[in-house]
Image: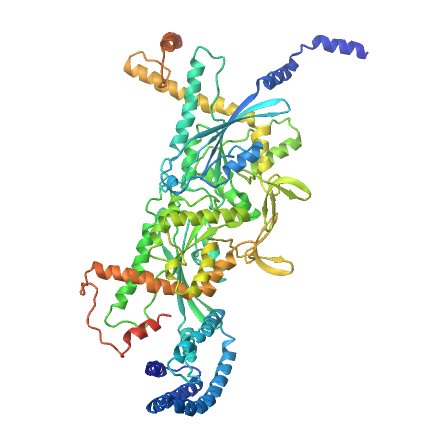
Amino acid sequence: NTATTKEHREKEYVGFATLPNQVHRKSVKKGFDFTLMVAGESGLGKSTLVNSLFLTDLHKDRKLLNAEERISQTVEITKHTVDIEEKGVKLKLTIVDTPGFGDAVNNTECWRPITDYIDQQFEQYFRDESGLNRKNIQDNRVHCCLYFIPPFGHGLRPVDIEFMKALQDKVNVVPLISKADCLMPSEIKKLKERLREEIDKYGIKIYQFPDCDSDEDEEFKQQDRELKESTPFAVIGSNTVVEARGQRVRGRLYPWGIVEVENQSHCDFVKLRTMLIRTHMHDLKDITCDCHYENYRAQCIQTMTSKMNADKRVESPIPILPLSTPDVETEKLIKMKDEELRRMQQMLQKMQQQMHEQDL
Amino acid sequence: MREDTAGVLETESRAPMEDREEKERGVMAEQRGEEGESEATKENSTKGKEENGVDMKAEEEEEKQQKQQEEEDEEERGMSKQVEVTMEVSERVPGLTAGVIRGADLFGYVGIEAVLDQMRRKTMKAGFEFNIMVVGQSGLGKSTLVNTLFKSKVSRKSCTPNYEEKISKTVKLQSVSHVIEEKGVKMKLTVIDTPGFGDQINNENCWEPIVKYVNEQYEKYLKEELHVNRKRRIPDTRVHCCIYFLPATGHWLRPIDIEFMKRLGKIVSIVPVIAKADTLTIEERLEFKQRIRQDLAANGIRVYPQKEYDEDAEDRIVNDRIRESIPFAVVGTDKEHQVNGNKVLGRKTKWGIIEVENAAHCEFANLRDLLIRSHLQDLKDVTHNIHYETYRVRRLNESNMNFSELELSIRPLENGNGDKSESESHL
């Protein structure tokens, strides 16, 4: 009677189980984008790590500044975008670098340009989202910030604490122990424990791995546990390929041995890559959209509406970015947009009032 | 000239004799004998007669001298390496000395060399003082390096009972002294630590407490030196050497490094080192060093050994070689491991063992040799003869020879060569 059960099953079968596949197909066509920020002092191997993660050479023509240029250096924000394709899946990767961070003698508020940049991207997205033409919104929001902690210290330094606290509500902060090849296994363990303790102690909200579902298999759960227990990741990067154990691998050649970047007993590079790209990229984007961005948006609207109520003047709830050369057409469009939004805002207020009266 | 030599020898003979008095008396007796001879021969006018007469006696004296020297040599062989080095240098010198004296008709062996001997014995008895300062951000391995250099737990971290690795809010200098002994030579080693340097978000002027400390020590010494009743051996707390720890970024000097070395390089001998260098490959290390040297030159920073203080061509050759390889890339540890059946100081990682004393791995041995085995005395000399003198001149000019301020008054000289004995006791 297999024929009848099959028929029966087919009758019951609606077919929406294919949705994930459809989404998958569409995504492949559309491609993904991901914005990754790297922050930390000069010389901690940020560029090298990014190159190792994405197998690129983004900083080929980089020039290191000379002595005079460095004395008066301020924190800059630089962007490099690269399109990577693998097995038909396209990724538009944007790396946001922060040269000059923490390098000066006086580093007071050296994270300000960085927080300003992140806010600007949120602002841009907020405007676009509230606008009329939402077809091709470019998402430049920063999805993840890798923060490089030097391996030389004994734990978090004042600048580390201040930076992570300033960014914890704006972006997913993933702290890393950089240049981990100068640490012995016992030292790495001690440092990780110390860092985890201090992150707790100072109430720093770093990116938390989501708990895996209870119906996942034991192996996956074990992997997940291991991942969580080895944070912050101690990483090593390399721009060179060396010969080790008969294979050509990314590594660093020392007189006393060869460090292999992808050897899990040497460093946590593989774990970082797995987490960042292979398993949690989407989650990072989700948290950015659902959490950090929403926080920003809510705050924005709140300040706008409170201002409105205080002033009793009807103002545009959209923060107006200074436009370079607004022509007549765009001006008209903006005016129309503002009008519509004002009307929407008024409707909202009316509805709120009605609800309030109903409650009473 | 001969009279001068005689004068010196006589002064020395009046100094208190220690262990091997008899031997010394023997040496002194011979020298006095020769002095008597030389004075007698001076009365004879012809050179020829002098030569013959003196030669015979000189040969006998020479033999006795040589025997004495051999016996003394055997004892010396047991002494520390440092003292041997001094002896080696002096053995090269006799050629020069002899050349000088040849012109003044010295026949046979006077025994001036033996003065070095006496100096050495006195030095050993009195011991050395050495003050070393370590500067750098927290976590760069300062304490470990100092412990490894002197093979004992001399750093503040190892001595303070409740030592906590906390970042202090201000730069507070702390010093710890130990007396360490090796082969009969005692050294009072003082390690001055500078916790809090460069650790804050705003590190402006974090070098000021250090500059202040260095100058305070010079001031202390100056005050003592100008005192009416001053001690025979002025306690020397001046900083002889400042090791500056650079993090192994592989890029360039950071602004804080430049600011610090610019200021301190003028008043103390700075020895920059690349800390925790096991994160740099050999290639990266060479590039980094080159860039650092360029940076130092571009900013007019003079680090030890300074080119201007090379005394002669020989010094210059040795020091040039050092200058071409600074800053030394070091790795420090106090743990031992087994490598090829030997116990070595090293750091064990999953990819190999980094041997601290292996020249192919890192330059710790070079640093140790520079600081301790070859240039220890030179560091002290440069501090005393150059940095301290510069400070002294500046201070005396500042106070416009205001004697009352500096407690300077007519000081009775103890012997004719007051100044000379002063400089000789600065060992």
**Quadrant in the rendering for residue A122:** top left
> Residue sitting at 62 percent across and 57 percent down?
B339
Spot occupied by residue B85 in the image (x, y as percentages of width and height)? 47, 70
Q: Judge whether residue B189 can be spotted in this image.
A: yes
Establish if B53 lies above or below B10. Answer: below
> Residue sitting at 38 percent across and 32 percent down?
A112
> Residue sitting at 29 percent across and 72 percent down?
B231
Spot occupied by residue A104 in the image (x, y as percentages of width and height)? 38, 40
Spot occupied by residue B409 in the image (x, y as percentages of width and height)? 19, 70
User: Could you say which is closer to the camera, residue A117 or residue A214?
Assistant: A117
- For this orientation, the residue located farthest to the right is A1
Q: Quadrant of the C terminus of chain B?
A: bottom left
Establish if B189 lies above or below B293. Answer: below
User: How many numbered discs?
Assistant: 0
Indicate left or right for A25 with B111 as reference: right
Indicate left or right for A13 with A85 as reference: right
Indicate left or right for A51 with B397 as reference: right
User: Could you say which is closer to the camera, residue B204 or residue B14?
Assistant: B14
Q: Judge whether residue A227 can be spotted in this image.
A: no
User: Could you say which is closer to the camera, residue B182 or residue A302?
Assistant: B182
Spot occupied by residue A34 in the image (x, y as percentages of width and height)? 52, 25
Establish if A49 lies above or below B423. Answer: above
**Quadrant in the rendering for residue A203:** top left
User: Could you say which is closer to the camera, residue A39 or residue B181?
Assistant: A39
Q: How is the image coloured?
A: rainbow
**Quadrant in the rendering for residue A166:** top left
Q: Quadrant of the N terminus of chain B?
A: bottom left
